[in-house]
Image: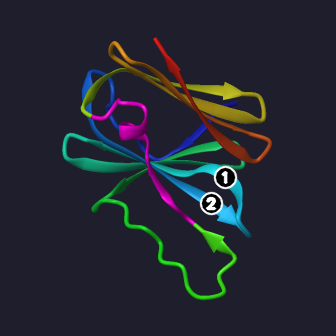
Amino acid sequence: MLKIDGIPPRLTEQLCEELICQQYWHQGKLVQEVDILFLKVNGRWHQLYFDTGMVFWRIQQVAPVQVEQQAGDTFSYPLINIGEKFAIQNCIIVDCITESLGEGARVTLVFEDKGSLLITYSDNNTRLQFIKS
């Protein structure tokens, strides 16, 4: 059964101003391809993340900021500009689909004339996939 914590933002028929992914790396190895996904729509930032099969939505007041690493840290949280990478920044989101995957969940953002961005959580791992239309 799909569980959502927080209020999902209205994304359908909205302009995706920015789309940034925070990853989680430990000892030089990628642990979570998507630790947090940050979306900017209508001038507001939103966070999307998953934990124990739940989908979490949060409003964020400011743009994401790179977490600074300290000397000796074995972890890092780089920010990846997904909007730029997949040429979907400043594109219209025509649909946002949230679905249960048994022990996991998936959120799919469909972009007008571009394709779909799938954020999938399963086996305690979050992955990102872009499928061009």
Judging from the image, the colouring scheme is: rainbow
Q: Quadrant of residue 88?
A: top left
Query: Foreground: 82 or 46?
Result: 82
Residue 86 image-quadrant placement: top left
Q: Is residue 8 visible?
A: no
Q: Is residue 115 above or below residue 19?
A: above
Quarter of image, res 25 = bottom right
Q: Give the mark, 1 or 2, whose residue is nearer the N terminus.
A: 2
Q: Does 62 lie within the magenta span?
A: no
Name the residue carrying label 1. 32
Q: Residue furthest bottom?
A: 71
Reply above or below: 50 against 64: above
In this view, which residue lies farthest toward the left? Answer: 43
Secondary structure beneath disc 1? strand
User: Is any part of residue 74 visible from this angle?
Assistant: yes
Q: Residue at x 33, y 30 (%)?
A: 11
Residue shown at 70% from the left, 30% from the top: 1
Structural distance between the alpha carbons of marks 1 and 2: 5 Å
Q: Give amino acid for label 1.
A: Gln
Q: Which mark is residue 41?
A: none
Q: Which residues are magenta?
A: 77-89
**Disc 1 packing (10 Å; few <14; some 14–19; many ≥20):** some
Residue 24: image tag: 2
Instruction: Count neighbours of disc 2 (C-alpha within 10 A) and say few if under 14, some if 14 to 19, many if 20 or more.
Output: some
The answer to whether marks 1 and 2 mark residues whose Cβ atoms lie closer than 8 Å is yes
Relative image position of residue 52 (x, y in whole percent): 72, 49
Residue 4: image x %, image y %? 55, 40
Image location (x, y in percent) of residue 16 = 29, 34
Kindly state the secondary structure of the residue where label 2 is placed. strand
| Residue type beneath disc 2 | Tyr
Q: Which of 83 and 104 lies nearest the eye of the viewer?
A: 83
